[in-house]
């Protein structure tokens, strides 16, 4: 039981860290440019430029990557699934994580935004 609490806290911190880093730094721009091999005609330099580009050109996937709560929800179930597969946790951690970690990560993101 205690190990499941540790895994729950670990998963929450992992998701929160990912969302804060994704939304407050330019790592998303660097990843986008890496995945699309630094196209010469792209004028994407900041995360705001990337968000505009994704909103106009990528449809539902772009919305998923722009919205911190949507992205946190999908990252949460992926992290929870990995924790379940790698540990002896109950499968309910997937449900617990999916429905609670996005809110926790959004709160951390709000705090990080206020600090900046």
Image: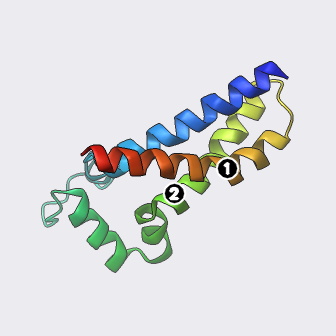
Q: Quadrant of residue 82?
A: top right
- Please provide percent x and percent y for residue 95: 78, 49
Tell me what residue is drawn at x 28 percent, y 71 percent.
Answer: 53
Q: Which of the image's four quarters has the N terminus?
A: top right
Lower position in the chain sequence, tag 2 or tag 1: 2
Given contact means CB atoms under 8 Å apart, are the residues at marks 2 and 1 in contact?
Answer: no
Q: How many marks?
A: 2
User: Is 103 rendered above or below residue 59?
Assistant: above
Q: The residue tagged with tag 2: helix, strand or loop? A: helix
Direction from residue 29 to residue 6 in the image, left or right: right
Q: Which residue is mark 1?
A: 100
Q: Which residue is mark 2?
A: 71
Tell me what residue is drawn at x 27 percent, y 63 percent.
Answer: 50
Residue 99 makes an appearance in the image: yes
Crowd rating for badge 1 (residues with CA inside 10 Å; few <14, some 14–19, many 20+): some
Marks 2 and 1, how far apart at CA: 13 Å
Q: How is the image coloured?
A: rainbow
- Please provide percent x and percent y for residue 70: 54, 62
Tell me what residue is drawn at x 76 percent, y 46 percent.
Answer: 96
Mark 2 vs mark 1: in front: 1
Nearest the viewer among 28 and 34 is: 28
- For residue 83, the mark is none
- Please provide percent x and percent y for residue 80: 69, 40
Tell me what residue is drawn at x 36 percent, y 42 percent.
Answer: 21
User: Is 35 rendered above or below residue 13?
Assistant: below
Direction from residue 98 to residue 18 in the image, left or right: left
Nearest the viewer among 77 and 8 is: 8
């Amino acid at each position: 039981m205690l190990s499941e609490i540790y895994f729950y806290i670990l998963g929450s911190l992992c998701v929160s860290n990912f969302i804060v880093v994704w939304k407050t730094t330019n790592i998303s721009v660097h990843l986008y440019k890496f995945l699309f091999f630094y196209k010469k005609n792209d004028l994407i330099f900041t995360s705001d430029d990337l968000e505009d580009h994704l909103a106009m050109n990528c449809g539902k996937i772009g919305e998923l990557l722009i919205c911190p709560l949507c992205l946190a929800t999908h990252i949460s179930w992926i992290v929870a699934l990995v924790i379940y597969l790698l540990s002896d946790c109950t499968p309910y951690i997937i449900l617990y994580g999916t429905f609670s970690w996005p809110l926790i990560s959004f709160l951390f993101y709000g705090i990080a935004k206020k600090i900046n």
